[in-house]
Amino acid sequence: MRLHIWLFFVTVFLAFTLLAVGALALNLTLQPGSEGIDSEIRNNTPDTNYGSGASIFVGMTASEELRRGLLWFNLSSIPPGALIFNTTLRFYATFSSNSTTNITIRAYSVLNTWNESSVTWNNRTSESWTARGGDFNSSALSSVNVTNLGYYEIGLTAISRPWLVNNSGLMLKTDELAPNFYIIVASSDYATAANRPWLNVNYSLNEPPNITGFNDSSQFVRADTGGQLTFSINWSDDQATSAHIYVCNETANISGCPDLTYCTVNTSSRSAGCSYTVNSSDNQSTHYFIAVCDDYNCSLAENTFYVNHAPNVTVIQPNGGEIVNQSLGNYTVLFNISDSDGDNLTVSIYYSSSPGTKEHFVDSMPNQSCTECSYSWNTTNIGGWYYLDIEVNDGGLTAIDSSNSSFRIASITDFDAPSIYNLSITSDLVSGASATIRAVVNDSSSISKAWCTVNAGGVFTNHTMSGFMSGFNVTIEAGAVGTYYFKVSANDSFGNFNATEWQGFQVAKPNASISYINASNATRFGITNFIVHLNASSEIKRAYLYAYSDLAFIFVGHSQNRSLGNVSGISNYSWYAVVPPILGERNISVMLGDSYGNTWVSDNYSFTITEPQGGSAFGIDSYQLYIDGYKEVVIGENYLVRAYITNYSGYINPNNINVTLRDPIGNLLTGLTLTQQSTGIYNLSYTTGPGLTQGQWETIIQANISNQTLSKSQFWKLIGGPFDVRSFTVDDNIVNNLAVSFVIENTGYQSQDITLVWNLTMTDGTQLHSGAETTSVGAVSEKPYTVHPITSYVGDVRLTVIGYYSGGERAGGYVEFATEQAEEPTPTPPAPTPTGGGGAGPSAAPNVTKPAEERVVSIGVLSYSDHIIAAQSMLTRGYITLYNKGSAAVRARVSLTLDNYAVWPEEVSIPPNEAASLSFNITAPELAGNYSFKYIIFADGEKVLEKGALLEVLPPKPYLLMRIEMQKSTLEYLRNLVGMQPGLADLNIVLDIIERKIKRAEELIGSGKDELAEEVVDSNEAYINDALDAIASFKIASLQMPKAVPVIPYITITTIIVLITAFILLVLLLLTLRRRKKEGSRGEEEVTRRRIIRRSPQIRQISEARIQPPQMVDIPDLNSPDFEARMKQTLKDIEAIRSRLKKRRER
């Protein structure tokens, strides 16, 4: 009897031990058959594949031919983060070339993926190995000596852990030093199953870190807003050496806080901490969560921290402008105080000559909690202008408020108005001159304000005067010629008012003269220089010059109406202009004007337009071709060139005209079209792009007219990225407040610094201001930038900006504009009086076309691809769905305003109140950029609708990064769905694989392996599709099945539960022994699978659900609007993601 009891307890102990070990250690055994992946590669047949062979040769043959073996095992069933204890490879040697000497077989990790059906000595797939003979780590994992036939084992524990992330298999090879040293190994296609390669992995599941203690500094003293709150965390982990710690406002996961992160730290210290700057928006008691995570799991704890908020105080009176009269007794100070934490406050009152300085202490009052507070202030022996300062303190934080402006403490009463006398104004005023108005203002108390009012023809303007009782003054700018009036007004500190009578003054026209000088006569189509001589003894404010002529000159450098800014003294101004092709004596005059309507006009100057030297040789039938174009163009901008064809009578149209561009390496660009602007004048606007060669280009224009061939050429320079400085805008042209903005574009694929050097100069090059600044611009992005030059100069200026980058390369641009002192409109000059000859006629009225009324149609667009993203030269897809809202069937078709596309079906017939979809393929252009296009919709053969859309073409790398971001968004969407459905919890294993693959792709991109990253992204979409299929199936099934029974949580190992479990296990072991006899013919793999199903209630539930017959259940109301809306929205979301991923996989 005692023996039986002893055996019972021994059995219980052993059962407990087996349970504990089973909970910690798991075993995976793989010995695949023909579905297994292995092969050999040979250097004597480097392009031959041996993936279907039953044997694998390893070593060097007698003829010195090298043979190597490749094997791959599928470890995807091992969960992420598993701890590997031991991994063993076993193979069977069917032959050894030397039975007396050991042949050392070594195992190496393979570095790149390979394909069993296509791997050779030279190629791993359709792509070649980096090094012929396979890419493998030169350090062997382990080795074994082979002499005779039989089984041999190699330990692979070191590589099995990395295999869980990136499994490219292993290579078997000898040292390959001597001929006739090789073995033959049975492959997965070997006839005898027991001799096939075999892999055994012993592992345990990942356990989350353990939080052993935590606290925060507010548990001792409340944390002040704006101060530091320190969190302290102690943790332990038997499997990980480091942890990610997050402190959040709500629960967290291994990715961090889903909402607000107070602080975070990555640490290997078991006692760690982080700090948070307390915000005034934090509650007085704020609940928080602490998460300690390894790479796969998190442990959570929660607590509350306590915050001290600053009190508030508001001064009500005196708040500025009051007079505190000592003769009336104590003055009542009013103020408000509050504290959101309900603390008792200490109030301290001060008065100061400057706000907030607390110069003179008045009183202090502890333990105050009033909201409308008052204090009786004895102001005896205090006199002057002061501010009131009130400070409150809650024991930790203080707050202070002061009067908005000063108030006066006095003991007088004043009823007398200020006296104003000795008024004067600057004499001999002209338009634009500075006029100073002066007055003496006295009062027995003090002057609160003095001002001057100017009457300009019934328009009254007030100007505040500054000064003291001995004299107040203000300076204004004299206006247009005429008679003006002014008067001075004042208030004293008691509000008494006084004003003078109106005083008159005159403003005259400034003294100036203008004359015209020309150096020589002009030749037609030549460049002439007009020079104007200006003599202004008075300053002319905001002056401008306007050139009148009876011919249409083309002005170069400066416009015909030229702004000068403020001018005075003697100066010359010049224009350059292209002379019209009309011979004879002509006249020109110049008008000077200012912003006040004053004008000065020069006398007419006569000059003669003649033929160029040898001009008579041209004759009546002689024709000339002139061209003028941009000299330098930045890649991405338009190049513009203009051609002129003339004869003796002026501009004339040729019979034909064409243009050719030659790039710096001699390639010709033909087929370009010149656009006619007017008679004999033609333009070419050519858009440059990233694919063009930078350097010196040549433009060649040829024209044929009356059996003559005219030809001209011009050279220009094309410059490019990665930086461009462009799009200048003058935001403010007022001196001392200048602001000029522009755009900096980085066309490169990495963030770079650019040093901007800018110069503000006059038009003659005189420097006014300069500066240099360095800024960083992100990859493939634009950055707006603004500079603020400083100058008092008024007139024409140029701002030049040059950006230096990459140790010497540069990009730049400039803008010309006129600075001003005030925003005054320039008057429109009167039209000149013709003095003979032809001239430009009046502008033609604009051609206004009345828009056609929209045809009422029965076709509408339900949805369509309005924004398509593709890589360069990539085949992409889109769709458009039309619906017929009419009463009769409609034949519909769609075309796109794009090149290289195909739509199918070409035409659809849509019945009334039904919809139909058309799909299309688009081959993206070779150049990256945004391409706007339209869908043209036809109904019964007539165009009825247009829909705008955008094709965004990205370079390969940005497109790959975009795909990764979409996979991240899809993963987040899937996790949210899984989190809301307990029955989908097992999908977290798939989602974890997706997340690891995303991280792996990002790592490969970071190391420059974009092609490998693209393979990982492609393979990841298969996992995403599987997850979407599972969720879609679950969504549909869940509408027809009762709610699932909650899964029993994992058993916690405590003493009582262990004893109960051990007893039950003892019974199960006896039943298992009986069942084993009946399952003798069942394969080991099937038995292992069933054990796993029995061990996991959740997996068992899913497995059983697949094989159970349908049950009668209560079906929800399918006509319910809420049911229909939920169903449609869920399936629409899933289908949209599946559709995008399917299209990307097809590409």
Image (cartoon, grey):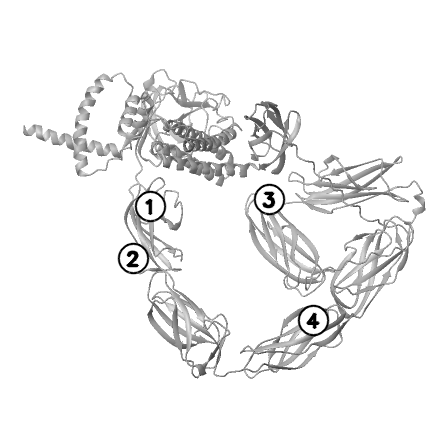
From this view, report whether residue 1057 is shown above or below residue 891. below
> In this rendering, does residue 888 appear at all?
yes
Residue 746, position as x, y percentages in the image: 59, 46
From this view, report whether residue 862 is shown above or below residue 630. above
Q: Residue at x 57, y 55 (%)?
A: 774
Label 2 to label 3, Cα distance in Å?
Answer: 53 Å
Counting residues from the N terminus, which is met first, the one under dot 4 or under dot 2? 2
Label 1 to label 3, Cα distance in Å?
Answer: 42 Å
From this view, report whether residue 371 is shown above or below residue 726. below
Task: Identify residue for label 4.
Answer: 455
Counting residues from the N terminus, which is met first, the one under dot 1 or under dot 4? 1
Q: Nearer the viewer, mark 1 or mark 3?
A: 1
Q: Residues within 10 Å of mark 3 (few under 14, many from 20)?
A: some
Q: Nearer the viewer, residue 769 or 74?
A: 769
> In this rendering, does residue 898 appear at all?
no
Task: Identify residue for label 3.
Answer: 747
From this view, report whether residue 1044 is shown above or below residue 563. above
Rendered-image quadrant of the C terminus: top right
Task: Identify residue for label 2.
Answer: 219
Counting residues from the N terminus, which is met first, the one under dot 2 or under dot 1? 2
Q: Residues within 10 Å of mark 1 (few under 14, many from 20)?
A: many
Task: Identify residue for label 1.
Answer: 292
